[in-house]
Image (cartoon, rainbow, N blue to C red):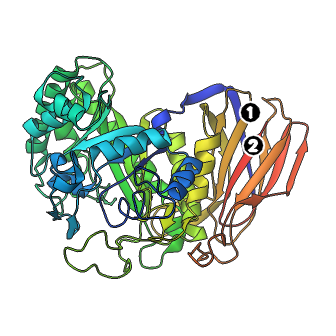
């Protein structure tokens, strides 16, 4: 198998948006409790945050974190999570069938964001609650002082307003599983009212508001939902959300390897719909996508023990990712980068323990899942400008998407003159020789790191934490601006041209 790509730094797609490397912390399972927050843990700092996890988060490199859900937010009373911890009530969480202790809330989340230097992305509850509570929350968070809610925040020890710029108007409001599911018209109206009213408080131009799009491309009203919601909100919001999770269906791992095809079609569909609404409204404005939940998620697999009803922070959605999952995950990241002209925010769902790149044991260690590595490398090296890439690749056959190219790649030019090519060989069986025509740039050092495994099911576990990791790939030849690299079957590769 031979593939070839070429690029030219003069021909670009978009600047890589900072928010593309977002992640997500939901009050779900052990993402918060015994994930990022565990005051009894030997590494816990004065805020109860686990330093071992904070170190891994810094290494992972998220730029923004969405909070507090997810399905959880649609039943959440944000006031429960502020003020003295001993006064905070315990509540039933109907989204996940657990008891929420509220020992972690908005103030703790903001401390966490400052500690790991990420932008907060806050969701409001438009399920059981509505406009007034969203306004109260916004006033508590962002108003400087001199009013009931802002002074309450100050009395809780946070003198300065949080200055949260990015807000999600509810979560997956189209889903029958959502507490307070709404029709597109009902949701479009309340999202518009909320958006306009938040802007009454804020007054500045730099508030970014996200309306809920479809929970997946497979939803029965996909397209119609976006059309109706945006017809109501086009001038009051900035983003429409998209969510997508992938896993092999009926053991069809070949189609699974090509999951990014679905993500591409999803993005095409949302953009076409948003632009059509804009055209009908004769608006010059463009609505971009916040892909604020994406990942591999084995939704049909048993995810550990069924939690005891109403238990506290049980093990839920604790997927253990394989080498194959990491390669598919990397391919999804490549799509997000390739489409970053219109996908200008995205969140890997989620951050710790719950379908996450980082795992922990209560009182015990924290370690990197296989999916940790593509994200960390993309966040570290995928900064700058996405380039147009022309590619010629062998194809393979999939049941779900027909013929798909085996090579999936993107090139990002850094400000320092370097170019990084992220390349996935999606073929499970056949290695590939990739030729990169880099004659348009100065080729100095070329380094390649490759993640693959002879056992596609290999995973990192608490007992074998470093089983799968990227290794230096020495199969590289550089000659007259042509770089030739051997890409193993089923591999994620980061090729740095400095
Ligand atoms: O990320 C897990 C769940 O997936 C989120 O709570 C929800 O928004 C989605 O269905």
**Measuring 67% from the left and 26% from the top, which residue is drawn there?**
415
**Measuring 36% from the left and 73% from the top, which residue is drawn there?**
315
Q: Is residue 449 left or right of residue 97?
A: right
Choose between 484 and 116: the one closer to the eye: 116
In the rendered image, the quadrant that contains the C terminus is top right
Residue 418 disc label: 1
Q: Dot 1: what SS?
A: loop
Figure quarter occupied by ligand 1: bottom left
Q: Is residue 236 visible?
A: yes
Q: Is residue 68 left or right of residue 10?
A: left
> Could you tell me residue 329's position as x and y percent?
53, 58
Choose between 259 and 69: the one closer to the eye: 69
> Could you tell me residue 64's position as x and y percent?
43, 41
Toward the right, the furthest residue is 479
Q: How many marks?
A: 2
**Measuring 21% from the left and 52% from the top, which residue is drawn there?**
73
Q: Is residue 439 left or right of residue 275?
A: right
Contact check, label 1 and label 2, Cβ < 8 Å: yes
For label 2, the crowd category at 10 Å Cα-Cα, with few meaning under 14, some 14 to 19 and many 20 or more, is many
Choose between 95 and 366: the one closer to the eye: 366
The residue wearing badge 2 is 496
Tell me the distance, in whole angstroms, between the alpha carbons under discs 1 and 2: 7 Å
Is 429 above or below relative to 343?
Answer: below
**Measuring 65% from the left and 48% from the top, which residue is drawn there?**
422
Is 489 above or below relative to 102?
Answer: below
> Could you tell me residue 34's position as x and y percent?
40, 65
Residue 433 disc label: none
> Could you tell me residue 188's position as x and y percent?
14, 39
Q: Dot 2: what SS?
A: strand
**Mark 1 or 2 closer to N-term?**
1
Q: Is residue 331 visible?
A: no
For label 1, the crowd category at 10 Å Cα-Cα, with few meaning under 14, some 14 to 19 and many 20 or more, is some
């Amino acid at each position: 198998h031979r593939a070839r790509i070429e690029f030219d730094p003069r021909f670009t797609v978009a600047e890589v948006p900072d928010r593309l490397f977002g992640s997500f912390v939901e009050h779900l399972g052990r993402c918060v409790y015994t994930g990022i927050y565990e005051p009894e843990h030997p590494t816990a700092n004065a805020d109860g945050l686990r330093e071992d996890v904070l170190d891994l988060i810094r290494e992972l490199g998220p730029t923004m974190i969405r909070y507090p859900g997810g399905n959880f937010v649609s039943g959440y009373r944000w006031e429960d999570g502020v003020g003295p911890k001993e006064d905070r009530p315990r509540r039933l969480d109907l989204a996940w069938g657990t008891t929420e202790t509220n020992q972690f809330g908005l103030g703790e989340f903001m401390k966490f964001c400052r500690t790991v230097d990420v932008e907060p992305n806050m969701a409001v509850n438009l399920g059981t609650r509505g406009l007034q509570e969203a306004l109260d929350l916004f006033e508590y968070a962002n108003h400087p002082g001199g009013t009931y809610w802002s002074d309450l925040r100050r009395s809780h020890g946070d003198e300065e307003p949080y200055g949260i710029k990015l807000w999600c108007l509810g979560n997956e409001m189209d889903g029958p599983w959502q507490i307070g599911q709404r029709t597109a018209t009902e949701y479009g109206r309340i999202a518009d009212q909320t958006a306009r009213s938040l802007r009454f408080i804020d007054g500045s131009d730099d508030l970014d508001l996200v309306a809920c799009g479809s929970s997946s491309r497979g939803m029965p009203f996909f397209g119609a939902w976006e059309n109706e919601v945006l017809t109501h909100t086009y001038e009051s919001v900035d983003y429409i959300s998209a969510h997508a999770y992938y896993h092999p269906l009926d053991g069809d791992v070949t189609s699974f390897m090509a999951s990014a095809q679905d993500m591409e079609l999803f993005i095409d569909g949302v953009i076409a719909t948003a632009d059509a609404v804009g055209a009908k409204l004769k608006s010059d404005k463009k609505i971009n996508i916040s892909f604020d939940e994406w990942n591999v998620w084995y939704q049909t697999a048993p995810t550990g023990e069924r939690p005891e009803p109403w238990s506290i922070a049980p093990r839920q959605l604790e997927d253990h990712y394989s080498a194959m999952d990491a390669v598919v995950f990397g391919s999804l990241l490549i799509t997000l980068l390739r489409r970053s002209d219109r996908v200008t925010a995205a969140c890997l769902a989620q951050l710790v323990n719950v379908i996450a790149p980082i795992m922990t044991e209560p009182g015990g260690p924290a370690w990197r899942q296989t999916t940790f590595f593509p994200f960390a490398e993309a966040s570290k090296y995928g900064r700058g400008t996405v380039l147009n890439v022309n590619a010629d690749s062998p194809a393979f056959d999939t049941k779900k998407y027909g013929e798909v190219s085996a090579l999936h790649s993107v090139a990002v030019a850094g400000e320092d003159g370097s170019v990084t090519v992220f390349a996935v060989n999606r073929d499970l069986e056949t290695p590939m020789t990739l030729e990169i025509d880099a004659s348009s740039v100065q080729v100095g050092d070329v380094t390649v790191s490759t993640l693959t495994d002879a056992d596609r099911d290999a995973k990192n576990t608490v007992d074998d934490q470093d089983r799968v990791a990227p290794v230096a790939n020495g199969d590289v030849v550089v000659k007259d601006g042509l770089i030739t690299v051997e890409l193993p079957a089923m591999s994620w590769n980061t090729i740095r041209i400095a």
